[in-house]
Image: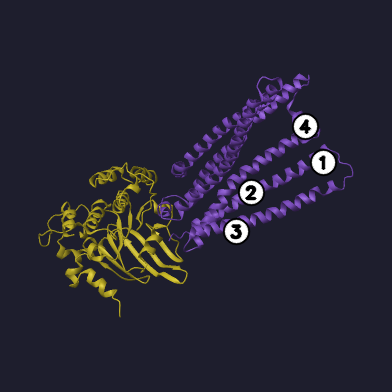
Chain colours: A purple, B yellow
Amino acid sequence: MFGKLFKHDMKSTMRIGLPLLIAALALVIFGIFNSLFASFTQDLSMKMIEWSVDGTINERVAVVLTILVALATMISSFFQSIGTMVLSATYIAMVIINLVRFYKNLITDEGYLMFTLPVRPIEILSSKVVNACIWNFAAYIIAMGGALIQTAPMYIRTAALAIIANKEMGLEVDLWSIIEQVFGVSGINPMLLALMLVLAVAVSLCIVIATPVFMFFTIYLGGVVAKKHKLLAGAGFTILGYEIYSILETIIVFFTITCALLPIFFIEKAPGAEILNYVFVIISIILALSVVVLIAAIAVFFILTKWLMTKKLNLP
Amino acid sequence: MDEIIKETAQAEIAECDACSIEAKESCVPLEENESPVEPCDCCANEECEAQEEEKPGETVVSVKELFKDYGKLMALNGVDLTLTSGKIVGLLGPNGSGKTTLIKILSGLLTPTYGEAKICGKEIGEETKAVVSYLPERPYFGSWMKVEQCLDFFGDFYADFDRELAEKMLIDLEIDKTKKLRTLSKGTREKVQLILVMSRRAKLYLLDEPIAGVDPAARDYILETIISAYNREATVVISTHLISDIENVLDEYIFIKQGNIVEHGCAKGYEEKNGETLDMHFREVFKYVR
């Protein structure tokens, strides 16, 4: 029955979710072209300087072209900022879509259908959670990936220029040396850096799963506790829960970081990469703990919601 | 209404052994291998009771000491009830008497505060939901759904759903199954929902106010659909306060008042036996005192 529930949940979310994701993808494609256009205007401005210096174009033409390039750059930057904001909003919109579907499907009139189906509450909840995670994850990938991809032409151009410059100077270019140049130190442990990145991705994944699980719990709790204005009550519980989580997170992370990084202040001479590696270890530990806490939170909120659906089901 | 009864009963009508006039199927005390010769209305009530004593049907609903409160409000106050198969039962009471609460508990939408409710001997759960066909008093499909998607939905989840029957009824009513629910009128949406619910071969039909808020012509159609489409081995519980519209189709009636069952009796031939209609009796029982 889970498969059937999942199929119908996917269908109902697809009505709004799919056009949203397609629009976001279209925005990413537009962003890539916008970025290419921005690179082109930068190249053009460089060329204009060369042309005006060697007399290929006269001053008046150079001024007009400069104004046009400046305008194009402004427009391009504006669209890039808007695009990034809209892409971030896509993820939030998808989270809200899934919440509204959950609320309408289980707490309003549609709940009369869902809760009279010959299925267990855990199947209903699992279907909703898996469905929400898939859509939220898709939106997250498009939002985050899109923001990176649409700026990619600019990075590629910068990297290409750097490689050309290095080659002209007869220098070999390797990726690791570029990363070390970014951090400004040499001797970084690559395994540690990789571990930190993997843990960061794991935390992101856990957040994508934990968000609907936590919000489904608070929304359902609102539906059970409140006699009227159930959605408002659910939103209230969500905000309250989020605030409690934020305060606890801030306190724990602040104390962990403070305690962990305290020894650094007593080192008389900064040993460069050693400190950076130490910081990476601390961040990795915090990230690993976050993964454990988030998995535990997912389990607890899932079980609590299932319990509410089984024992406290009270449709108006 | 009488026409509906006549039409429905015609297929099953034969001559009564006792007085050789037309009678209805539901009160026949059949022995094994006996031909379905039926008693007339005048004999029906007595024979109905006799049938209950000699060959009681399978217990479909069993409720013991059922309590349900909504905070300070006691919606059900120690209800005891047993319903057997093959009956159309009217759950009758004024607004706020506990009809919907009882139906919701039986359909698994509410958890009782205290007490026991079983369907076909099983605790309310996914097993009982598979044999209960519930019609709520409100639309429960998303308005974005097409009628055919509703059919798909029922077909996916209910093994006892007869899609052919549902499609036939949709054609009879000239309802376009490719249309979205939001494009249909309120009455048509209700009909779609009723068609879906009655197209199941369920053991228990729980119909909450199926005729409230619809015009008299639609009421006739709804009752006709209920009578013609329901599984004869099943029990149909119809909750309403519009007694006069349904009393002729009922086998049994239950009066519920302030969360208590105050009367549970045989509705067949009630008028002949008591000299008043069930509707008149209802008005008497639930009369408001100035």
Residue A294: which disc? 2
Distance from Cα at disc 4 to Cα at disc 1: 16 Å
Q: On screen, A117 above or below B115? A: above
Distance from Cα at disc 1 to Cα at disc 3: 38 Å
For mark 4, give the secondary structure.
helix
Tell whether label 4 touches label 2 (CB within 8 Å).
no
For mark 2, give the secondary structure.
helix
Q: Nearer the viewer's eye, disc 3 or disc 4?
A: 4
Tell whether label 1 touches label 2 (CB within 8 Å).
no
Distance from Cα at disc 2 to Cα at disc 4: 34 Å
Amino acid type for the residue under numbered disc 2? Leu
Q: Nearer the viewer's eye, disc 2 or disc 4?
A: 4
Residue visible at 68% across and 41% down?
A199
Q: Which numbered disc flags the more N-terminal residue, 2 or 3?
A: 3
Chain of the residue where label 2 is placed in the rendered structure: A
Q: Nearer the viewer, residue B173 or B265?
A: B173
Q: On screen, B121 above or below A40? A: below
| Residue position for label 1 | A275
Q: Nearer the viewer, residue B287 or B24?
A: B287
Q: Which numbered disc flags the more N-terminal residue, 4 or 1?
A: 4
Q: Which numbered disc flags the more N-terminal residue, 1 or 3?
A: 3
Q: Are marks 2 and 4 on the same chain?
A: yes
Residue A181: which disc? 4
Chain of the residue where label 3 is placed in the rendered structure: A
